[in-house]
Amino acid sequence: DVKVTQSSRYLVKRTGEKVFLECVQDMDHENMFWYRQDPGLGLRLIYFSYDVKMKEKGDIPEGYSVSREKKERFSLILESASTNQTSMYLCASSINGAGGLYEQYFGPGTRLTVT
Amino acid sequence: TQLLEQSPQFLSIQEGENLTVYCNSSSVFSSLQWYRQEPGEGPVLLVTVVTGGEVKKLKRLTFQFGDARKDSSLHITAAQPGDTGLYLCAVGFSGGGADGLTFGKGTHLIIQP
């Protein structure tokens, strides 16, 4: 059974803290993604990576960075957490094919609260 | 401006009824996906549609891609409580398959027993 796991289901951090969200997939997928989901705004793409050490900005990269040192692991970093980064964070992975849309497999999400 | 407009935003109906939800855009897409998300979980892919006019069926769910590839619909026949969830349509972030997805805001569907 394919699996994307996220390090925490719930996380509470203080404003200004450095926050690491970890995501691991066991499907040997090339592509990995980070989204945030907010009521009224839906799911929005933060960053994605199509290979180790590669990263691309999504729709809302400001205030975030990412790291992909190993193929199976993709980390989202909040350098200095702010209250407007309180959200549900979802990680996903997919194969890297020749074209078209491929199925994205999502983790269960991390609900981050910044106080 | 939202790239993908989903309607209705909320829908609550009785078990056994039929329903249709929509995903509309002014842009043309090479393909479009539908996902369902249940509370506390990540979205799960239901279907990918590629060809204009294409109809795909998944048990009681029927998906259609518009002839002009600008819109899509999801029809559920004889809805059941297990169909409850957030239904999301999505297209490639920059048109490609290796990129992330751009999602509509979703339709929150509740099927009451």
Image: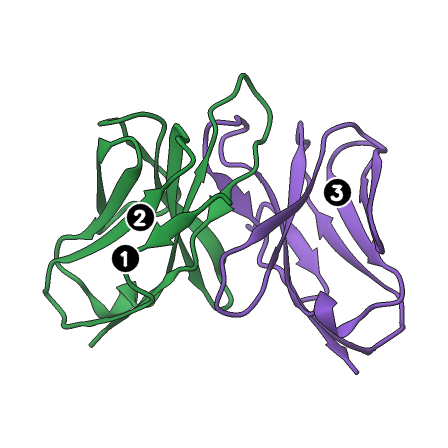
Chain colours: A green, B purple
Residue name at image x 51 percent, y 41 percent: A104
Query: Splitting the image into 4 quarters, where does residue A90 fall?
Result: bottom left
Q: Tell me, yes or no, if residue A79 can be seen here.
A: yes
Q: Are marks 2 and 1 in contact (CB under 8 Å)?
A: yes
In this rendered view, identify the residue nearer to me: B2 or A77: A77
Where is residue A100 shown, x and y percent of the image? Answer: 60, 25
In this rendered view, identify the residue nearer to me: B23 or A76: A76
In this rendered view, identify the residue nearer to me: A36 or B24: A36
Q: Secondary structure at mark 2?
A: strand
Report the amino acid beneath label 3: Asp
Q: Chain of mark 2?
A: A
Discs 1 and 3 share one subunit = no
Q: Secondary structure at mark 3?
A: strand
> How far apart in space, not on screen, are marks 2 and 3 (Cα)?
33 Å
Q: Chain of mark 1?
A: A
Where is residue B15 shown, x and y percent of the image? Answer: 84, 76
Q: Chain of mark 3?
A: B
Disc 2 vs disc 3: which is toward the camera? 2
Residue that carries the numbered disc 2 in the rendered image:
A23
Q: Are marks 1 and 3 in contact (CB under 8 Å)?
A: no
> How far apart in space, not on screen, are marks 1 and 3 (Cα)?
37 Å
Query: Splitting the image into 4 quarters, where does residue A13 fall?
Result: bottom left
Where is residue A15 shown, x and y percent of the image? Answer: 14, 70
Which circle marks residue A26 in the picture? none
Which circle marks residue A7 in the picture? 1
Residue that carries the numbered disc 3 in the rendered image:
B71
In the shown orientation, is residue A111 left or right of residue B102?
A: left
Report the amino acid beneath label 2: Cys
Q: Is the residue B27 above or below the residue A38 in the image? A: above
Disc 1 vs disc 3: which is toward the camera? 1
Report the amino acid beneath label 1: Ser
